[in-house]
Amino acid sequence: MEIDCRGLSCPEPVIRTKRAIIGNPQSIDVLVDQVAPLENVQRFLKAMKYKVTVVELNGEWKISATK
């Protein structure tokens, strides 16, 4: 599952991520283009017991999380 949160300010990326993990998916990718959502989404996913990795793609980030 992939969520595109580019162009969105906090807290919207975290809210969308929270909605997306309601079904408890084994993996999720979140795309962001600002530092604040990058940090906040990572923090949220880690709190939900996901293993998080981040890849930078030309000033944007792909947050990949797996159970």
Image (tube, grey):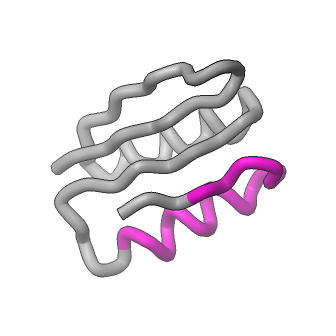
Q: Relative to 5, is 54 above or below?
A: above
Q: Is residue 33 left or right of residue 45?
A: right
Residue farthest along the front direction in this orientation: 58
Which is nearer the eye, 26 or 59?
59
Q: Position of residue 27 (x, y in %)?
A: 25, 55
What is the span of residues highlighted in magenta in the rendered image?
Answer: 4-21
User: Residue 55 falls in which quadrant of the image?
Assistant: top left
Check the image and report above or below for 21 versus 57.
below
- In the rendered image, residue 22, in percent from the top left (x then y), is placed at 36, 78
Question: Which residue does the image show at 66% across and 29% down from the upper left?
Answer: 60
Judge by depth and name the residue closer to the eye, 40 or 3. 3
Say left or right for 7 vs 17: right
Q: Quadrant of the N terminus?
A: bottom left
Residue pictured at 72% horizontal, 27% vertical? 35
Residue 7: within the magenta?
Answer: yes
- Dividing the picture into quarters, in which one does residue 13 lie? bottom right
Residue drawn at x 43%, y 26% is 54
- Give yes or no for residue 37 being in the magenta stretch: no
In the displayed structure, does residue 34 sit left or right of residue 19?
right
